[in-house]
Structures are given as C-alpha cells and as structure tokens.
Amino acid sequence: MTAPTRVPVRTRTSADLIRAEEPVLAHNYHPLPVVVARAEGTWVEDVEGRRYLDMLAGYSALNFGHRHPALVEAAHAQLDRLTLTSRAFHNDRLAEFAERLAQLTGQDMVLPMNTGAEAVESGIKVARKWAYDVKGVPADRATIVVAADNFHGRTTTIVSFSTDETARAGFGPFTPGFRVVPYNDLAALEAAVDETTAAVLIEPIQGEAGVVIPDEGYLTGVRELTHREGCLFIADEIQSGLGRTGRTLAVEHEGVVPDVLLLGKALGGGIVPVSAVVGRRDVLGVLRPGEHGSTFGGNPLAAAVGTAVVELLETGEFQRRAAELGAVLRDGLADLVGKGVIGFRSRGLWAGVDIDPALGTGREISQGLLGEGVLAKDTHGSTIRLAPPLTITEAELVSALGALARVLGRG
Ligand SMILES: *Cc1c(COP(=O)(O)O)cnc(C)c1O
C-alpha cells in the first residue's frame, strides 16, 4: 500500500495554495487571488513568477519597499547577535531606538510595543492613568472621545468604539468609557469633552475610512480644544505617519504637536511588528514598573530594525519623495476624474479613490488591477486605497495610473 499522494508544497500552484487555505485558515480575510512568493522594492512576484507593482505596501507597513537593503542588513546583523531578552533585562539596542525615535518625532519618551492595536491599547491605558493620577478624574469615570468611522485595530476594547458594524457585531460586551463624535467636526468634539475626558483619540487622516482628510484647521482646533479643556490629544499615526504623507507625521501639515503619538506599521520596516506610544514625559511618566508590559515589546531585533527605520527617515529622503511623487499621483488622479473616478482625496503618496459604482465594486476594480499587474485594495464600497512604497519611481507610478485608466476604461 502506498500513502495517498500529496502535491509537494514547493510545487503547488497559486490555485492549489488558495484551495489549501480554505479548510485550515480562519476566514477573517478575503484576499485577492494572488499568492506572493517573493518581493523586492516596489515589486512582488507570485508562485508562477508573474510580477506585480505593489500599490498597497502592506497598508503602509512597507513604506520603504520590500526588503529595503539597509533594513534587511540591520535585521541580519541583529539576528546573528541577539534577538530577545524580554524586558526582565536591559538589551543594548533599546536605548538608541528610543532616543532616536523620540528625537525624530519631537517627543520625550517611548513605550515600545509590537502591533498597532497594542499601541492603541497602551495609549488608552496611559491616558486613563494620566486622567486619574494627574487630572484627578474620579476612579473608573475617565472617558475618551473618538471619531466616527475610525480604525484603530481589532481588540475587544478597540472595536468597542468602532462604528463599523462588521467589526463589532458578535463581539460584545464592549468596553465602556468612549464617546463617538463625527470626524472633522469641532463643535461636536467640544460638546463631547467634559471634566471626565482623559483624551481625544483620532487619526489625523482616516485611512481605512478611505483616506479621509479633515478640513484645514481641524487638527489645530483639536489641539487648542484639548489644551483648553485639559485633556490629552492622542494622534493615531500608525498608518499616516513615518513619511507616507510627505512629512514624518501627518500632524505636521498643520504644525500641530499632540501629547501622544501612536506609531506602528512602517516602524517595523516590513520585517517585524514594531509599534510604539511616543509622548511627553509628564504623560508616559505615569506608568510605574509592573503596570503595563509586553514580552516582545522593545526586543533587540525590533529595536535594531526600528532604529534602521528611524535612520532612513532622518535623511528626509522618503518624506521628500512622498511629497514630490504625491503631486504626480494627485495630477494623475485628477486626470481620471470624470473618466470612471468620481472623486479622490490624496496627501503625499496616499490616496482614496472613489470609483463610479456603475463600473464595479472596489473589489472588482482591484481584481481588474491585479489582471494589469498592479496590487491595490478597496476600503469600503467603491473606494480604492493607493499607498505605494515611498521608494516607487515616477515611471512606476505613472504605469500604475495607466493601469487604473485601462481598468476604468473597460468598465
Ligand atoms: C493598521 C492600523 C491600526 C492597527 O494596527 P495593527 O498592527 O493591525 O494592529 C491602528 N490604527 C491605524 C490608524 C491603523 O491604520
């Protein structure tokens, strides 16, 4: 008797691999039908060797492209020396990472975590602790004001203040203490803030909502309001930060300095999950030993990669590229308005493009782009998000816009 033959893993086709996932992987995603096997820079290659231009960049986790040489080198060098200590001990990489990240972002202190959701959770905990210890809010009464259509991650506390029913339904009971107001509405924010308010937590640009950019003056208004009311301004820059919009931080477009920044995604250079809460000493200083932690947070490998990421951003090159090529992206999209695009919002190398629903859903357009050798992803309805690596060339960007024009022209 011979054992039933199985297709060896290495020779499985994309179709085999997609089929193989179905019974063994939880269905919490609905990926486009492409199976990526290798990547470099702005390009990925599937199992069959077809090449695609990456116009999503891991939702901004790949701001420096796939396997940026400086980041891969930093990771390799660290892998050969020390990877994990836990925070039970010090490691020789963490001080430099914290110093340089604080310096880059104009803040005092860093709380290293791993995923974006953990940074948000940590920011919430710090804000609550600050409200009780510093502001004097009565125990368990602290509130945090957030915006409708937010995306801050997937934990039970974070989905407690999501307004996306798909993200919430079936996951209650929810964490209390959050007030939701419309985004880009200072009057609503003002009405929601009171003496119990620990913080206002917003994205300076709402990524998952479709790259929604608030009116000029909103972020300044949030800063002034939170100063006046004596509560913290927490900016979730996990997707908008680290070069994406043409500045190190999206809040810089209004010259605003929040009390707390949440960073993630690109901080790990597309190699390892690295996130951080970065803030003023009088805020992050409320944490005492034992009150918060993470086994992997601040590990030497993460710190080495994170330091290399900060080093790339210190050059200003990526912010400059995002600003310059962002103009090419904006002009290219403007040319498509009325030709299948009904509107778009962009800042730097980041755009939310509303496609005429008559031409198809966002997913159908993304499928069409896949057929043209371009990876992109819909957000909601007929909106496509474009967020290429900041290393993309002008010619590559123009070719991606050409592919979009062809897909829309066929619709
Ligand atoms: C992606 C994202 C998060 C969550 O990050 P994870 O690493 O997926 O947990 C939080 N906030 C914003 C704005 C994001 O874009």
Image: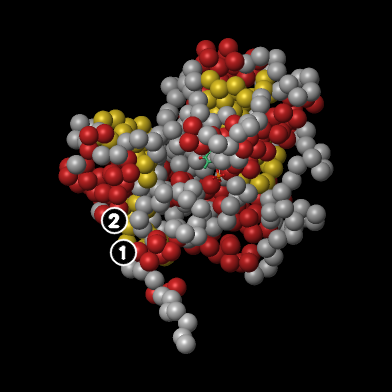
**Residue at the image point whose x is 41% and y is 64% from the top:** 17
Residue 237 shows up from this direction? no
Q: In which quarter of the image is the C terminus?
A: top left
Q: Quadrant of residue 139?
A: top right
For ligand 1, give the image quadrant: top right
Position above or below: 142 against 333: above
Q: Which mark is residue 373?
A: 2
User: What crowding class fits label 1: few (fewer than 14 Cα within 10 Å), some (14-19), or many (20 or more)?
Assistant: few
Q: Where is residue 180 in the image (x, y as percent from the top left)?
A: 56, 22
| First in residue order: circle 1 vs circle 2 | 1
Residue furthest front in the image: 1
Q: Name the residue under label 1.
A: 50
- Whether the residue carrying mark 2 lies under 8 Å from ligand 1 is answered with no
Q: Which residue reaches farthest right?
A: 289
Above or below residue 214? Residue 323 is below
Color scheme of the displayed model: secondary structure
Amino acid type, label 1: Arg
Q: Which residue is at 66% across, 25% downward? A: 177
Q: Where is residue 372 in the image (x, y as percent from the top left)?
A: 25, 54
Q: Do the residues labelled 1 and 2 touch (CB within 8 Å)?
A: yes
Left or right: 169 as drawn, with respect to 131: left
- Report how far apart the C-alphas of labels 1 and 2 lie in the structure: 8 Å
Q: Position of residue 369 (x, y in %)?
A: 28, 49
